Amino acid sequence: MFRRFLPVLPLTLLTLGPAAMAGDDRPEPWRLISQDIAATTSQCIGRPETPLCAVETLLACFQRANQALCRMVDDDEDQYAEVFSDPPESGKYLAYRIVGPRPPTERGLDAKLLVEQQEVATGKPVGSAPVQTSLFKLRRQADGSWKVTGWGDPSDME
């Protein structure tokens, strides 16, 4: 039976391309956060059960100007009071993708995620705005949830 598929195997590998043969190390696909929950990729905003869910909750906090989301994942959320003095800017969405995890190197730190993000005008495609890369540092809480302990430019955070 295997012999019947043997001639097809090389063609299949060529069709899939070099990434399939060497292992696919491309970044994840772009995910979206908008003010419209139905147009948002994440299903766990507001439930920081994983490091990714905690990061998505913080990103949604800013995109939606919803300080309650910040309180869920950041103990120093009061620093954002000035940010949320104006209503959220409509007509934009946040595109983001996880570029990769980073091993935690600091005491008390449980995870790091490297994230590319861009704020895009509604109706414009992903890639039409400048990309910013941020490193998020996270800590697991006693109740199993995750908190963001810091984020910023990766060169300042390593």
Image: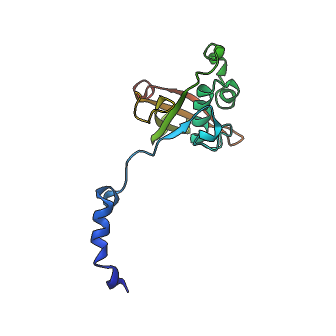
- Residue pictured at 67% horizontal, 30% vertical: 69
Q: How is the image coloured?
A: rainbow
* Residue 28 drawn above or below residue 21: above
- Residue pictured at 31% horizontal, 58% vertical: 22
Residue 102 in the image: x percent, y percent?
45, 40
Say if residue 135 shows up in the picture: yes
Say if residue 107 shows up in the picture: no
Residue 65 placement, left or right of 24 = right
* Residue 81 drawn above or below residue 31: above
- Residue pictured at 35% horizontal, 56% vertical: 23
Q: Quadrant of residue 19?
A: bottom left
Q: Nearer the viewer, residue 139 or 11?
A: 11
* Residue 128 drawn above or below residue 41: above
Residue 40 placement, left or right of 3 = right
Quarter containing the N terminus: bottom left
Q: Nearer the viewer, residue 94 or 53?
A: 94
Q: Quadrant of residue 39?
A: top right
Q: Nearer the viewer, residue 140 or 94?
A: 94
Residue projecting furthest to the bottom: 1
